[in-house]
Structures are given as structure tokens and as C-alpha cells.
Amino acid sequence: MKNKVKYLYQLADKAGMSTKTARKYLKSAVLPSQCQTIHDWPTHPDAFVQDWPWIEDFLKNNSGLESKSLFEALQREYPGKYQDGQLRTFQRRVKQWKALCGPGQEVFFPQIYKPGQWCESDFTRMKKLGITICGVPFNHMLYHFVLCLSNWETVTVCFSESYESLSAGIQNALWKLGGIPRYHKTDNLTCAVNKVGSPEEFTANYQGLARHYGFESCKTQPRHPNENGDIEQRHHRLKNAIEQALILRGSRDFNSRADYEDFLEKLLEQLNSGRTKLQAEELKALRQLPTRRHEDFTRDKCRVGQFCTIRVLKNSYSLHSRLIGEKVDVRIYAEHIEAWYAQRRIEILPRLRGENGHYINYRHVIDTLVRKPGAFENYRYKDDMFPTSQFRIAYDILRRQHGIKQANKQYLKILELSAKENQTAVNEALRFLINHADGIDFDTVEQTVKSEQQSPAVTDIYIGDIDLDSYDYLLESAEALLV
């Protein structure tokens, strides 16, 4: 620039400075940025210098200690020496010490993925989104599967972190994808990973699933979910996408589970539509699927006990009394249980969640219970003997009319009629008699059912508009009394 101008003031004007300043820089032959003095001296005296060895000792031996808690301990150690207004200064001082002398922090390492190599999956709970089915809260989970390179994802609705849910979820994902990645990573799921110290890293069921599809199993370290970072991040983004879609939809209520699953399917199709280029690369590298799916269930053998029940996964289920003493094969699926005997499926039962629950079908025990009505009053599974609310109301009416002993006999006969005839017909007969008859007994119920008389439809309840003038009158009367 110096060679392009004739006078120094022109040079200074182009640089945006005075002639005097330009002359100074030209004589020194040093750039302005190089003339700045590094500020390495304190502007204020260190108020904590006397007690810093005591503070530093705490910081070295207690890495999780917060600055505020340490400052409060310092105030207790030296009463009146330090004021609350010095907290912010103390926090800056501790922050500087941690950056210069503290322990190193955990480092996150970005990964480079090759097409068709890595996939990750995990379960995530959906309770916070407030999904309802016909107004009833739908407390469920999603099994979430993601390809790490393209972020192609899919989900399966489930209700527990069981092996059966994992098996169904990953197989649904692989068959929908149309191929198999080389590696599948999860966190320390109890349904797939054995406890620390076990000779086998993964459970036998999960190993069988991996062998069937030919993928290599990987897991994160205990209490390190960040190592499964792709799926963890997709959890957050998917839930946010669902939340936004629900807001646009204008309702979180669905007519059925199928409607909700269709909603998820359409949303995922939309999300995956922007990943088609990378997904195509992944599809070229995926390995071929086997000729058939792996079993979506686990097997067990149970003996039917004298209570007419079997014990499966710490829950009790009833089977027909004629099977007492026999061994049955049990197939445990994600949402139901099948009982097999002599190569025949004899029962399909809903799978219970948690422990020490019970599912007792009155049809399995009613033939014996009718002969032993005295056992009904204190029967452990008595609550399961009321298939609908109408049966429960009828039982309460019978107790008031006939007393406990006679009511039990009458009710068990009604229950037997329901098992042999038609539960819906008996339920409608009970509804009619509860609302229109003076009393209930077995003979009346039986006649009503066998007459095949059409019960009147459920009465619609109409609640008219509330007249708010009455509330105004009450308020005016209250004010008058106060005056």
C-alpha cells in the first residue's frame, strides 16, 4: 500500500488511523496486533489466597463437589470471613483451577461409519407424550432401530424390555429393511447381556438370534449410554418429531392401537424419505436375509398345579382343571402366552407385566367351584371371578338379598350359566334385571337368557346446560350476609 500512495497522510487515511500513529508503526516495523501486551497480572487481590490450600485439598479429593457447596463449607470453617456476594468470584476461581489443574474430562470421539456396517437399537419410554387410546392412557414403549450411517430408523410398539420384545423388534426392522448389517450394538439390556462376571457375555437366547441372522453383537460399557450415542440421539429427535406431529394433528387420542401404529408408520416414512441416498448405499452393502424368521418367542415347560394354575415369569395363569398334574409347553411372546399340550395349542393368555400378578379365567374352575361354593368367599382369585362390572353389581345385590352363603351359590350358578351359554347374553340379562327388576336370582337370569328377549339399549344420559344465575344468587346472598 505504501508504494501506491505518494504521501503518508494518504496511507494513514486508507488504514483508518492518524498520521502520527501510522508514522509510529512504520518506524517500529511491527504489526499493531503484535504490539499488544499480554494481560497476565491480577486486577484485584485474591480474597481466597490464604485459605486456597484448604480449598484445593477438597477439590482434589472430591471431584463431584459443587462450587456453591464448597463455598458454604468455607463459610462454616471461617465464620464471618467470607460474604455471600463473593460466591460468584469463588465459582470463577474454582472453574479456573479445574481447567488448569483438575482431572481430565471424558472425551467424546466422533465416529466414521461405512455403509451396511453398523446398526444400533434400544428401548425408549413414551409416557411423557401423553398418548391415549379412546381416552385411556396408553402406557407403552418403543423398540427403536437405527442404521448408523444413513440414520434410517423404524420402531415397534412394546410394553417391556423383554427378550421377546427385542427379538420381535429387531426382526421387524431387518425384514422391513431387507438386509442385515454386520454389527448390532445395544446398551447393557438385561434381556441380551448377562451380568458382569458371567462366563458368557450375551444370553443364550440373544446369541441364538444373532447366529440365525449372522450379525456380530456389541454392547456398551455399564452406565455409559453415550457409547450408544446414535440411538440415544435418535430417541430425542424421534420423540420431538412425534410431539410436533401430535400438535399438528390436534389430538393425542387415537381410536385404536392400530390407528396409533399407522400414525407412527407414516411419520417414519416421512423422516426416512430424506435419507434415501445414504440408505441406498447401505442397502448395497447389507447381507441377505435368511429364508425364514427366527422364533419370536421363548419356550418353557410348566406343570399345572392343584390350584389349576401354571407359574410363568413369576406370574400365575389358569388352565382348564382337566390338565391338573400334566406338563404343558409354554411359548412366551412379547404380548401373549400360548399353552400347548399334545402338539395342540390349548390356550392363548395375555402376558402380564411385573411380578406376582395373576390371570384366572373363571371358565377353567367354575365346574369345581359350583360343587364347592364354600370356597368362593375367601378364594385367593375371587376378583377374577367377575368378568364385567354387571356381574360384580349382581353379586353385591345377591349378598344384600340372600346373605353371603346363599348369594355365593346363586352367583356361581349364574357364572356357570355364563360359561356354558353365552357371557354376552348373561351380561345383558344382568344389566336389564339390575335396572328394571326388584331382585335377582339364578332362575330369573336363566329365564331371561333362554327367552332370548332383546334387552333395551343402554340409556343415553343427557346433562343440560347449567344455569349460572343460581351461582350469582348465592354469591349475592353471601355478600348480603357479610354486610
Image (spheres, grey):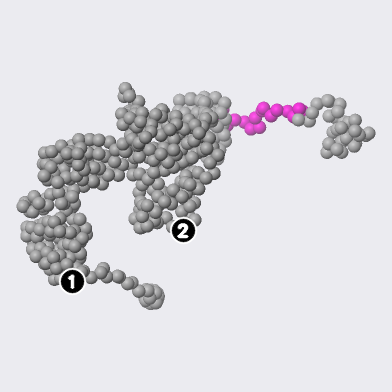
| In this picture, residue 67 sits left or right of residue 401 | right
Instruction: Give the number of marks.
Output: 2
| In this picture, residue 127 sits left or right of residue 360 | right
| In this picture, residue 286 sits left or right of residue 344 | right
Amino acid type at image mark 1: His
Q: Is the magenta stretch mostly helix, strand or loop?
A: loop
Q: Which residue is drawn at 41% across and 39% down?
A: 175
Q: Residue at x 50, y 44 (%)?
A: 272
Query: Could you tell me which secondary element the residue under label 1 belongs to?
Result: helix
Q: Which residue is drawn at 17% across and 45% down?
A: 318
Against 56, residue 152 (above or below) is: below
Q: Give the range drawn in magenta.
A: 34-49
Q: Position of residue 90 (x, y in %)?
A: 55, 34
Depth check: give the residue in front, 466 or 248.
Answer: 248
Depth check: give the residue in front, 217 or 390.
Answer: 217
The quarter of the image holding the C terminus is bottom left
Q: Residue lying furthest right in this view?
A: 6
Query: Could you tell me which secondary element the residue under label 2 belongs to?
Result: loop
Q: Where is residue 17 in the image (x, y as percent from the top left)?
A: 84, 37
Amino acid type at image mark 2: Gly
Residue at the spot of label 1: 436
Neighbor class of circle 1 (other Cα within 10 Å; few <14, some 14-19, many 20+) is few
Q: Is residue 340 magenta?
A: no
Q: Which residue is drawn at 50% across and 33% down?
A: 284
The numbered mark at residue 250 is 2
The quarter of the image holding the N terminus is top right
Give the alpha-carbon distance from disc 1 to disc 2, as whole Å. Answer: 42 Å
Sequence-first disc among 1 and 2 = 2
